[in-house]
Image (tube, grey):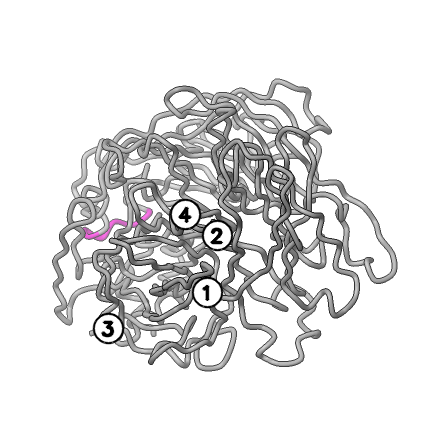
Amino acid sequence: MSNLFKRTLLASAGVVQAFGLSAWAADHSSDAPVTSIYRIGYPVEVSIIGKELGNAATAQNTLAVKHYAMGRLAWELAYVMPDHRTAYAGDDGTNRGMFRFVADRAGDLSSGTLYAAKLTQKTAAGDKNGGKFDISWISFGHASNQEIDSYIQRGIQFSDMFDAADPSDKKSCAPDFVPSEADGKKECLKLKTANRLGMSALQIRNAASRLESLRFAAYVGATTEFRKFEGVTYDPVRKQMYIAISEISKAMASGPSLAGIDDDINVAGNKCGGVYKLNVNDEFATTSMQPLVLGKPKTYEGNLASNTCDLDGIASPDNVVMGLNNDTLIIGEDTDAHQNDVLWAYDLKSNKLTRIFSTPYGSETTSPWVYKNISDKVDYMITVVQHPYGESDEDKATSDADKRAYIGYTKLPKIKAKDKVVFDMLPVAQTDAEKRVAKISPRVRVNGQAHALSYTTLYRSGDKVGETIFGQHIDVSGRPMTGYSKADLPMGISTSPDHTTLLKKDGAIFSITQFEEGAGMMFISKLITNASGDLIPVGLKPIDLSGVYGGYTFCAGMPTAWGTHLGGEEYPVDANAFEKSGGKDKYFAPYLEYFSTAK
């Protein structure tokens, strides 16, 4: 692996990304570098280009593109607004930002202008109600995938864009440096105007804006204080965007340590997090922000003692999604403050929360999405149960079989936008048996008419269809990575699917599932339906990601209005620390295993 590490410090040549989603060229010479630290941390879009998966090791009907123009961030989710041009980033982590990308053309994310938000708090510091804020936007300028790709190919490194220094007294920077606490790191930055690659000052600025997007945001004075900024969704009736903040803490609840940094967000800490609502103007830019619903810390005893947030309220909201009807917001949890993570239906008229889905011990609810365009008989709500027994209660798993993730769905009646929808409240899981199962609310009432509900499993980790094992890692050549170092289960199998998208292509139904792994992967399944609307898998293949230098820690995703799957790569490696270490990073190393058979 040491030689491979050295090669990652070079430019990524090997595969040249052409404009948009169409053309690709490859140079597989033995001297070509394998990848680069700057090849991960972007939205990845997958198009379905045919109805058949084919007979090769990987699917022959998919095409993947990595959108460098959208910026390198901790992409929890790339959420595209109804204009099909504007996309927001759920930027997950500590001291993160709010970012907005506006594409040049609707349905084509390969070029456009990136912006970062600047918040102004309108309420007093320490506000116990989550604060109210005005939002303005700072432009990073225009870039294309092709332009940013060319800088990576040339071997650009962090030191080609920024000079960085430690604060001299841990509290301030030299006059010609800009203080930054982005990503929870205290440092002093100065953007270069020339470098060893012969780049112009404008080229360096453009490169930094896309390859070091969070640091660049701090450098130009944007807000970098968000903690655990997760999912995003849009409400077209109220013209509001909803975002999930999993934990209101750290920079959101305290001032900066370095002199010269504005304290844009300063509210009371809340470990249970909250969902915020943001007003949106006609250009789909957010203009203000305040809480919609906040979690509430609470102490329990007995068999509920492990719960530290109110069981009748949200805890660590992660995914949020509109689409069921005009008035229902689905909220998913990723929490250790509820022993069993749940999905909530939040009524935007009554402000009432209803628990509608519960997961087994140690699981996370991911991928809630309502699909109305797949069947003319029923709607589908996809829900993924990620890493059962994985984040808590590991000792309660009786075997590896318990740990297998679930990709599942609930059939819903056809629901119209103005229908009144009320789920029966699912009780809190209290017994050991109840805490071991994935369970949906028993019924939903649409305009008063009751409909029985059930949760149907489509796949579990390790399921085999033909020669393909769902969740088994593959390398750049399409071969199974049975010895993958970070595998959750034997044979290189992952229990961490994070998002599944349903898509229809020329009448054929497909699902695309992405996995939250260092060597990120995606699978495509071909599905058929029976007379009852049940989804039935009839084919499964891994998706070939070699043309985009593999995947990395795929988190949430969405179906685009133009019929593609859009996923996000989360938690990119700190390129400054990586360069200083000589190319070593414990999180980057598993990603490199994907290239283990590369020539």
| 490 vs 295: above or below | below
Mark 1 — residue?
586
Residues 65 and 214: in front is 65
Q: Earlier in the sequence, mark 3 or mark 1?
A: 1
Q: Earlier in the sequence, mark 2 or mark 4?
A: 2
The label shown at residue 558 is 4
Seen at 31% across and 72% down, the residue is: 475
> In the rendered view, does 417 fall on the left or right side of 72?
right
Of labels 3 and 1, the one closer to you: 3
As measured in the structure, the alpha-carbon distance from the residue carrying label 2 to the one carrying label 1 is: 39 Å
Q: Earlier in the sequence, mark 4 or mark 3?
A: 4
As measured in the structure, the alpha-carbon distance from the residue carrying label 4 to the one carrying label 3 is: 31 Å
Of labels 2 and 1, the one closer to you: 2
As measured in the structure, the alpha-carbon distance from the residue carrying label 2 to the one carrying label 4 is: 14 Å
Q: Secondary structure at mark 1?
A: loop
What amino acid is at disc 2? Tyr
Residue 354 in magenta? no
Of labels 4 and 3, the one closer to you: 4
**Start and end of the magenta stretch?**
153-158
Q: Earlier in the sequence, mark 2 or mark 1?
A: 2
Tell me the chief SS of the magenta region. loop
Residue 157 in magenta? yes
As measured in the structure, the alpha-carbon distance from the residue carrying label 3 to the one carrying label 2 is: 40 Å
The image quadrant that residue 115 belongs to is top left
State which quarter of the image contains the C terminus: bottom left
The label shown at residue 598 is 3
The image quadrant that residue 314 belongs to is top right
| 10 Å crowding of disc 4: few (<14), some (14-19), many (20+) | many
Q: Secondary structure at mark 4?
A: strand
